Image: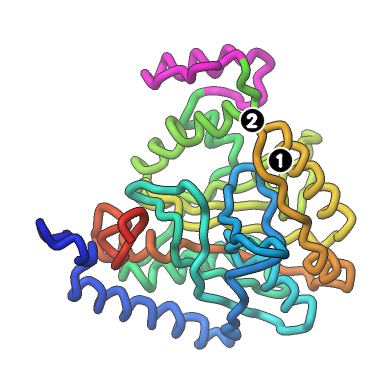
Amino acid sequence: MQSEGLEFSPTCDRETWILRQSLMNKVRRFFELRGVLEVETPVLSNAGGTDPQLDYFEVDGVPRHFLMTSPEFHMKRLLSAGFGDIFQITKSFRKDEFGSHHNNEFSMVEWYRVGMPQDKLMDEVEALVSEIIGKPLKARRTRWMDAFKNYAGVNPFCKDLNNFVETCEYYNIPVPEGKERMSREDWWDYLMVFVVEPALAANGAEFIMDYPPSQAALAQTYTDKEGFVWARRFELFVDKVELCNGYTELTDADEQRRRFNADLEIRRRMGKPLPPIDENFLSALESGMPACSGVALGLDRLFMLALHKDEIKDVVLFPSPIA
């Protein structure tokens, strides 16, 4: 805790920081033992991600530059250049993210496994988290649609959006102002945060997988036997904390460009800034990125769980906005 009257002091004490550094060493050792190459890519780029749900920091100057929300595009360029299995421990930046589990500058480990199917990558995520928290982790695996049915009691594809209002009332959570203007996807996001994610915590570790394509712009899709199209995406939740986001990676450059343009149209309607499309990344896909699965995992959150801390500020020396 920050000492009263010592505004310069870090929010993480020295003893905790020593423990954090030992855990960071374990993360690196985990990948070294598996023959995964460590890489380092820029945190400053001339193109930003198009995800409508993420806001980025733009750096003044000509040309425009952006602090990266993830090292994903650069790492996929390395995959296309033949680097093989790679990982990176890096800082990433997302605007207006503050809270007990959020900081607008944060540490992540992101890695890609060439030729590895998604279920095996999920096994590897479990192994890494088990190594860091010091006990075996065996997470249940639940499809996104089943999570809504099981934990919110609602079919996310119901015809009547008023069912979502009734869900809020049933679980005694506030009905959003301007509900009449909310899209189906707005409701998905709202109920995921306020109903589904809190319910996950009561049942231990859990992977949520197979998301709607609109919620996984960089993932491959598949069609199930009922004819529904799903994105091969997964997230891991442990003790009320979302730890990671992973994909079976999209390798089709034309489809990726189409999705980027669709994202930009959504951002335009939302009144958000429009970043340039990363043409270098698309060129990498066109050259032939190998089939792979990839995942980004928040290290500050993982270390918070491992060290039994309540908030990210307890494992970060100078969190925003006091930095």
Residue at the spot of label 1: 214
Q: Is residue 174 above or below residue 242?
A: above
Q: Are marks 2 and 1 in contact (CB under 8 Å)?
A: yes
- For the question of whether residue 293 can be seen, the reply is no
**At 55% from the left edge and 34% from the top edge, which residue is drawn?**
189
Q: Is residue 165 magenta?
A: yes
Amino acid type, residue under disc 2 in the picture: Glu
Any mark on residue 185, and which? 2
**Image quarter for residue 306?**
bottom left
Q: Quadrant of residue 17?
A: bottom left
| Viewport quadrant of the N terminus | bottom left
Q: Position of residue 19 (x, y in %)?
A: 25, 76
Q: Residue at x 85, y 48 (%)?
A: 258
Work out whether residue 305 or residue 266 is closer to the camera in this orientation and state it: 266
Disc number placed over residue 265 in the picture, else none: none
User: Residue 147's x, y, as percent?
Assistant: 53, 36
Magenta residues span 154-180
Task: Please state the horizontal and vertical placement of residue 101, each as a whole percent of the image.
Answer: 37, 51
Which of the pair 298/9 is nearer the observer?
A: 9
- For image coordinates 61% across by 69% down, the residue present is 44
